[in-house]
Image (cartoon, helix red, strand yellow):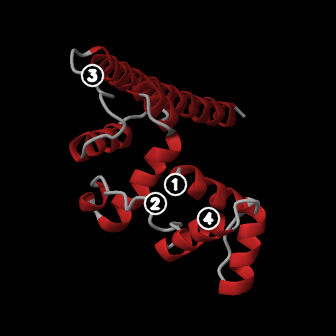
Amino acid sequence: MRTKNHEVKTENNKLIMHLKQARASRDHLRGMMEQERLQTKSLISNIINSSVDFRKSKFYSLEERLAIINLVDSSSLQNKYIISCLGTNYSTYLGWIYRYRKDGAGALRIQQSRGSQINRIPDTIRKTVIEYKKQCPYLSATHIAAIILEKHGQFIAGDSVRNILKKQR
């Protein structure tokens, strides 16, 4: 009977030692995470309070985007918190990450906009609108749009006709 009690006590002592070691490891990790969190917070506040305006324009440069991605990836803080501290939308950051992981750093370059060429009304239709208005000044913009659709097979909205006529004046 005595040996059984002794075995139970020994087993309990082993479990207690393992528990203490696990707690010590956990506390050590928490301390390291807290230290990293404070360092990241300090870095973010230095960026925000630096004499250089981090958001000087609508766009971040390639280097700034890469720096933000590296900062967020290396930090233990929540991504959304860091991104909001830097003054960027989280969805913008997710777009950067997607392009960076898919095509590399070159994909983060600022893309030149193509302008509004996609929805531009052809010049021939613009001239036709102006001719119809000159021939029949009493026609409404909606009526002119209907005539162009009927005779030329090209759809144009009444508002677009109004805008063309407004710019023509």
Residue that numbered label 4 is attached to: 134
Instruction: Identify the residue shown where x is 51% and y is 35%.
Output: 80
User: Label 4's element?
Assistant: helix
Q: Could you say which quadrant of the image residue 107 lies in?
A: bottom left
Residue 64, image x, y percentages: 26, 39
Sequence order check, earlier mark of 3 and 4: 3
Is 51 located above or below residue 15 in the figure? above
Which of discs 2 and 4 lies nearer the camera? The answer is 4
Vertical side of 95 occupied by 117: above or below: below
Could you tell me how far apart the alpha carbons at marks 2 and 4 are, in whole angstroms? Answer: 27 Å
Secondary element under disc 3, as helix, strand or loop, is loop
User: Which of the two discs, 3 and 4, sits closer to the camera?
Assistant: 4
Identity of the amino acid at label 2?
Ser
Residue density around tag 1, few if under 14, some if 14–19, many if 20 or more, within 10 Å: few
Question: Residue type at mark 3?
Answer: Asp
121 left or right of 56?
right
C-alpha distance separating marks 3 and 1 = 43 Å
